[in-house]
Each structure stands twice: as C-alpha cells, then as structure tokens.
Image (cartoon, rainbow, N blue to C red):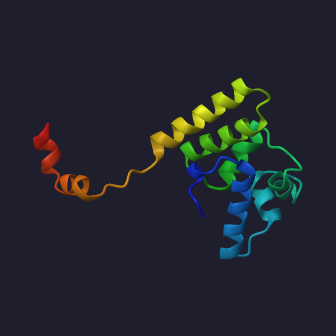
C-alpha cells in the first residue's frame, strides 16, 4: 500500500487501506467501523464509495482506527477538509496544509556523493 502522503483523496485511502488489510487477514467493514466507533457496520464502506461524508471528528476517529501516526492523522483530516471545502480559499488552505505536512515528514533518499558524505559521522561534523 502506498504511503498516506502520496494520496489526495481520503476515500481512496480508506478503500486501499481496507483492501490491504483484507488481503492480509480476515478483516471486514464491520470490524473497521466498530474499531472507529461507528454504529453502522457499513458506514466506512459507504464513505469510501462517496455515499456519505466524514466529519472532522469522525475523520480523526477513523485515522486512529487505522493506527496512523500523529502527522498522518493530521494529513488524513486535511484530506477530508480538502474534499469538503466549499470554496477555493478553503480548498487552497487545506491543500497547503497537506503539502506542508508531506514536505515535513517525507523521507529523503540519499544517492551517490550525498550518501558517501553522510556515511561517516565525522564528515558533517568536520564540515561545520
């Protein structure tokens, strides 16, 4: 499954999360909804299909049920806000927040010369 920071649509993330969990074990929409604290066993299925929306509070509960880290929870809630934004200003604000969270938490892969430089702890220390 892709990293949450690569998503822009929370519904797709929920569907992919479910498919990933279902492929690995006996996981159901009912179990998922119950873990997130919803009384309807198919609520999250309907959310992933676009029939229902998540409130900000429900988005937080759903993120916790998916065992997301703090910054991932925040990113998930911002995806919900982005989807539900009623005007361009709200949409831009949510998207900007998503980008800043992603930029702050994406791992950087070092290649070639950069890797060789940081391979030995002495190099950055001596460089300063």
Looking at the image, which residue is at 67% across and 68% down?
A: 20
Above or below, 18 relative to 64: below
Q: Position of residue 96 (x, y in %)?
A: 59, 32
Q: Position of residue 8 (x, y in %)?
A: 66, 46
Furthest-top residue in this view: 89
Q: Quadrant of the C terminus?
A: top left
Q: Position of residue 80 (x, y in %)?
A: 72, 41
Above or below, 96 relative to 26: above
Q: How many marks?
A: 0
- Between residue 123 and residue 112, name the one nearer to us: 112
Task: Answer with the quarter of the image where residue 70 lies.
Answer: top right
Looking at the image, which residue is at 14% across and 43% down?
A: 125
Task: Answer with the quarter of the image where residue 26 lies.
Answer: bottom right
Above or below, 96 relative to 73: above
Q: Quadrant of the N terminus?
A: bottom right
Q: Is residue 34 left or right of residue 123?
A: right
Looking at the image, which residue is at 85% across and 50% down?
A: 50
Q: Position of residue 5 (x, y in %)?
A: 56, 49
Q: Is residue 53 left or right of residue 74?
A: right
Looking at the image, which residue is at 83% across and 63% down?
A: 30
- Between residue 117 and residue 68, name the one nearer to us: 117
Furthest-left residue in this view: 126
Q: Is residue 115 left or right of residue 100?
A: left
């Amino acid at each position: 499954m892709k990293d949450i920071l690569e998503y822009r649509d929370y519904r797709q993330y929920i569907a992919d999360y479910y498919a990933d969990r279902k492929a690995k074990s006996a996981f159901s929409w009912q179990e998922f909804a119950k873990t997130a604290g919803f009384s309807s066993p198919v609520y999250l299925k309907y959310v992933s299909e676009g029939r229902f929306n998540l409130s900000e509070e429900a988005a937080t509960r759903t993120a916790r049920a998916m065992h997301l880290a703090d910054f991932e929870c925040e990113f998930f809630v911002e995806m919900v806000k982005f989807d539900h934004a009623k005007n361009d200003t709200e949409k831009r604000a949510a998207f900007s927040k998503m980008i800043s969270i992603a930029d702050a938490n994406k791992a950087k892969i070092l290649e070639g010369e950069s890797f060789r430089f940081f391979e030995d702890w002495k190099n950055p220390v001596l460089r300063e």
